[in-house]
Amino acid sequence: MTPAQPTRAQRHARWMRRALAVAAASGLPGGPDDVPVGAVLFGPDGEELAVGRNERELSGDPTAHAEVLALRRGAVALGRWRLTGCTLVVTLEPCTMCAGALVLARIDTLVFGAWEPKTGAVGSLWDVVRDRRLNHRPEVYGGVLADDCAALLRAFFHRPVDNAGPCG
């Protein structure tokens, strides 16, 4: 008997758990204070091509968002900038920069976790990915494991911060 193929929802949840693991790795003790957002790029065959986590603090680069880094690394892995057939899975609704980048990269499917009402550009504040004036519109699945994704962010923003500094 052949095992049943996972449903789209099951596959998206499995991929989101991978993105959550990538995001969680950015908040390890002693690491940079980057907001824990993780992105994973999957190829047309469902194989993982690249990962990205926020690295703005680590690199000093304002464009070093998880999505942009995953797209860059995926393009290198495939040897092309058009990422047609690929799925980008990210723990937080992309901002305008990231939404624009994934549209320009020709991502076929976007899966994201937590909604971002302050900067989200996939339906919350703007809807860049569905703008009919653009030449590409990915399929979007939002809110996948949203509670888990939001909990990771809440834990980061509500953690105690040592403000004593070097002068005590």
Image (cartoon, rainbow, N blue to C red):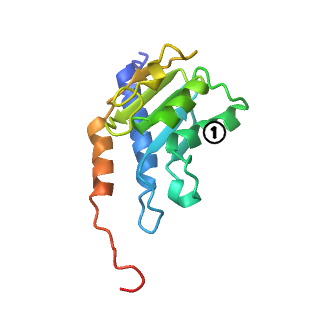
Give coordinates of residue 75: x percent, y percent: 67, 34
Q: Is residue 118 above or below residue 140?
A: below
Q: Is residue 111 left or right of residue 162?
A: right
Which kind of residue does numbered mark 1 sit on?
Arg
Give coordinates of residue 3: x percent, y percent: 41, 20
Residue at x 33%, y 56% (from the top left corner)? 156
Q: Label 1, on which residue?
A: 72
Q: How many discs mark residues in the rendered view?
A: 1
Give coordinates of residue 69: x percent, y percent: 58, 43
**Which quadrant of the rendered structure holds the N terminus?**
top left
Q: Residues within 10 Å of mark 1 (few under 14, many from 20)?
A: some
Give coordinates of residue 23: x percent, y percent: 43, 48
Residue 13 appears in the rendering: yes
Residue at x 39%, y 79% (from the top left corner)? 165
Answer with the quarter of the image where residue 16 lies. Answer: top left
Residue at x 68%, y 29% (from the top left corner)? 81
Which one is nearer the viewer's eye here, 14 or 151? 151
Residue 47 appears in the rendering: no
Q: Residue furthest right?
A: 79
Which one is nearer the viewer's eye here, 134 or 146? 134
Q: Is residue 39 above or below residue 166?
A: above
Answer with the quarter of the image where residue 48 lies. Answer: top right
Q: Residue furthest bottom?
A: 167
Q: Is residue 146 left or right of residue 77?
A: left
Mark 1 element type: helix
**Which quadrant of the rendered structure holds the C terminus?**
bottom left
Residue at x 35%, y 27% (from the top left corner)? 142
